[in-house]
Amino acid sequence: MATVEERVKAITARVLKLDPDQIKSEDNFTADLGAESVQSIELVAMFEEEFGIEMEEDAALSVETVSKAVEYIAQVCKEQGVVTDDREQKTEDR
Amino acid sequence: MRLILLDNSNEIRGNFYPLALSRPLWELRCGFNSLGQKLIAKVGANDVAYFVPDYMADSYRGKVEWPVNDSSVLNGDDLLIVDPRLKAESFNITAKGPSEVGLDEQGNVLYARIAKDDIGKLSTDNIDTFIANAKTKLPNVKSELSTWQYIWDLILANAEQITADFAAAGQHGIEGTVEQPNAIRGSKKDVYIAPGAMVHPMVVIDAEHGPVYIDEDAQIHPFTRIEGPCYIGKKTILLGAKCREGNSIGPFCRVGGEVEESIIHGYSNKYHDGFLGHAYVGEWVNLGAFTTNSDLKNDYSAVSVILDGRRAINTGSVKVGSLIGDHVKTSIGTLLNTGSYVGPMALIMATGKPLPKFIPSFAWFIEGVVTKGFGKGKLYETAKIAMSRRDCQWTKTEQTMWDAVFEMTAPMRNQAIKKGRRAMLTR
């Protein structure tokens, strides 16, 4: 399973029609990646689908950068009991 | 005698959505005013009380003078309890008379006239028990009184109702200001321009086929054509509108473009070009420029409407436009299909294609799909701003009511959001 960051970047690339390799953690969704408000809504929807979580709209849409999104999604996954990283899971299994 | 208007059946209320989600049925309008005003006038009541669904009681209490959901009104006087779907014009039950409960063919109570002396036989703890007791303990009669069945009945009856209301008002002539040049076609007896109303130059009022009533402080801007029967509410502004027959607009609306046989509640705007026909529009709606609805199918067949998000209901009419709930906002270029339902608080960004026929309440319709958007908090913020622009206040009780509507309508919205997600994933 890919990491949260890889999955966030993949979704971001698909919604914003970018090359995933060009997306950096510090990128701002609006200023650096050109996300418009409508695309922000689509990003939140696709993150929810990808991770199987429910995010609170105001909090999710106030996230500005890729790294903050990774952090926020990881936190929501943890709160909602969603396993996100296969390497972490395997370590725990041992 | 005390008149009690009773609106407590969810099944019946659903036939009047999306407007009834946020108001009791008697606040729906047809002709010059509301169904409640017509019933009160017909009965000649000067003591009135209301029973509404619990979730809207606090909000409604803040808007009216008479008691709301107060069981104490069930004591102390002769009562006439009325289903607000009853058409006032044919309501012929006298306030005085022996107790009787009028039932429709399905056994629903249409009215209950209860003499003060009989109230002791009934439990007055709450209205539901009271009505159930009345049905069991007092004489029942089969009633064939005419009722409104669906919200589009009001649209289809509007032109006729305006004509009847004009006759009942008994006013004609010009008491406001009419700047020249302008033209009044038909009989001047079929035109009334109320004090404070201002008709600018280059306006045509065509009363040849029905009366035109322009209420107080309305403004009719140049190049507007108003065709009767038509009612323009207080402080409404028409901006070069092609106002075809059968419209009831206002109060406090701003309307341009082409509008035909439509009912528009207060404080709604359709400022720009675009066609609205056979539509019912709630309060605080803003229809963006070139928002247009279809009210006639290409094959001239009867229009169907989806009121609950699942089942299409055949209206039996070849002309039905859109049903648009309170606080709906549409973007420029929104195209609404024939018989569309747009739930209250929905926000629509057009795609260039006709929208789905059912848009749930609180939906953010974006890029062709229903989404959660920025959530209901942002919709409330927008509503607050829109209301403050007209010196009106968004209240806590109102928000509580809308929170309840949000919960009630969640299943259909969530289903639409899931469908939208699937569509997004396949793009």
Image: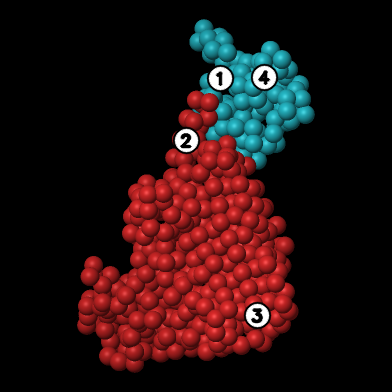
Residue on which disc 3 sits: B216
Visible residue check, residue B196: no
Badge 2 element: helix
Dot 4 amino acid type: Leu
Q: Identify the residue shown where x is 46% and y is 56%.
A: B295
Reading the image, the residue beneath label 1 is A84
- Disc 1 packing (10 Å; few <14; some 14–19; many ≥20): some
Q: CA distance from mark 4 to mark 3?
A: 58 Å
* Extreme residue in the top direction: A94
Q: Residue shown at 32%/78% (left/top)?
A: B111
The amino acid beneath tag 1 is Thr
Chain A: colour as depicted: cyan
Chain letter for the red part: B
Q: CA distance from mark 1 to mark 3?
A: 64 Å
Residue at 61 percent of width and 88 percent of height? B173
Q: Which residue is mark 4?
A: A18
Q: Residue at x 65, y 71 (%)?
A: B236
Q: Quadrant of residue B134?
A: bottom left
